[in-house]
Image (tube, grey):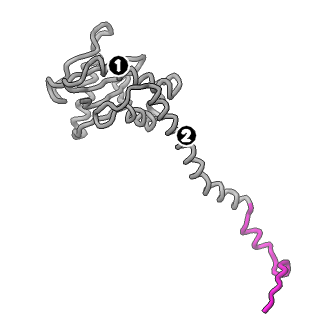
Amino acid sequence: MIKAILVFNNSAKPRLIKFFEHYPEEIQQQIVRETYQLVSKRSENVCNFLEGGSIIGGNDYRLIYRHYATLYFIFCVDSSESELGILDLIQVFVETLDKCFENVCELDLIFHIDKVHYILQEICLGGMVLETNLNEIVSRFDEQSKLEKQEAGISAAPTKAMTALKEMNLPQKLKDMKLSDLNLNLRF
C-alpha cells in the first residue's frame, strides 16, 4: 500500500504532499524532512529504492523515487508493493503531468495544484493504485477540464446579467422618465 506521495524540489521545498494515513502535522513535517535528507544525498548512479527511515512504519516501508530536472517524485510504500511497479507508476504520473500541462515544470505544480491532485486521484486513491493507463488518465483529465469550462460559463451568467443592467443605466432612465411620456390606457 502507498502510504505517502511527496514531490519536492532540489531546495527541499515541498510541491506536493499527499498522505494516505493520518499523521499529526508535526510528524508529517518530520517525515518530509527525513525523506528529503535520505533521497537528496544519494548519488544519481545508485538504485532508486531505499529502506525508509524510522518514522513511517520503520523497516516495513520503502522509499521509491525518481529525480527529474529540479523535482524529486517520492512514493513511500510498505513492503507489499512492487518496487518496479511503483517506479513505473511514478513514470506514468510524470508523463501524465507532462501531457496535461504540455511540458510540465515546477511552476505548474505550484499554480495548478488542484489539477495535479485530480490527476493523482485518477492514478491512486486511498493508497491503492486505480489506473496506470496514461491515455485513460489524460482522457479523464480532459473531461474534467471541459466540465470546469462549462461551469465557468454557467457561473459567469449572473455576472454578465448584472454588467448588462449596469450598462443600461436603469436608475438614470427611471429618473428621466416622465409620467406624461407613458401612454397608459386604463379602463375600468
Q: Which numbered disc flags the more N-terminal residue, 1 or 2?
A: 1
User: Do the residues under discs 1 and 2 have CB atoms within 8 angstroms?
Assistant: no
How dense is the environment of label 2, judged by Cα within 10 Å: few (below 14), some, or many (20 and up)? few
Mark 2 is on which residue type? Answer: Lys
Quadrant of residue 181 within the rendered picture: bottom right
Mark 1 is on which residue type? Answer: Asp
Residue 145, percent from left and from top: 52, 38
Residue projecting furthest to the bottom: 188
**Is residue 187 shown in magenta?**
yes
Q: Name the residue under label 1.
A: 88
Which region is colored magenta? 168-188
Q: Residue at x 20, y 22 (%)?
A: 52
Left or right: residue 1 compared with residue 120 = left
Residue 139, percent from left and from top: 49, 32
Quote the CA–CA distance across marks 1 and 2.
28 Å
Left or right: residue 66 compared with residue 186 = left
Q: What element carries label 2?
A: helix
**Is residue 6 shown in magenta?**
no
Residue projecting furthest to the top: 45
Left or right: residue 106 compared with residue 82 = right
Q: Which residue is drawn at 53% across and 43% down?
A: 147
Residue 8, percent from left and from top: 36, 26
Q: Is mark 1 on a helix, strand or loop?
A: helix
Q: Quadrant of the C terminus?
A: bottom right
What is the number of callouts on the image? Answer: 2
Q: Mark 2 points at which residue?
A: 146
Could you say which disc has been placed on residue 124 in the image?
A: none
Front in this rendered view, residue 83 or 31: 83
Q: Which residue is drawn at 65% across and 54% down?
A: 160
Where 87 sits versus 56, above or below?
above
Where 92 sits versus 148, above or below?
above
How dense is the environment of label 1, judged by Cα within 10 Å: few (below 14), some, or many (20 and up)? few
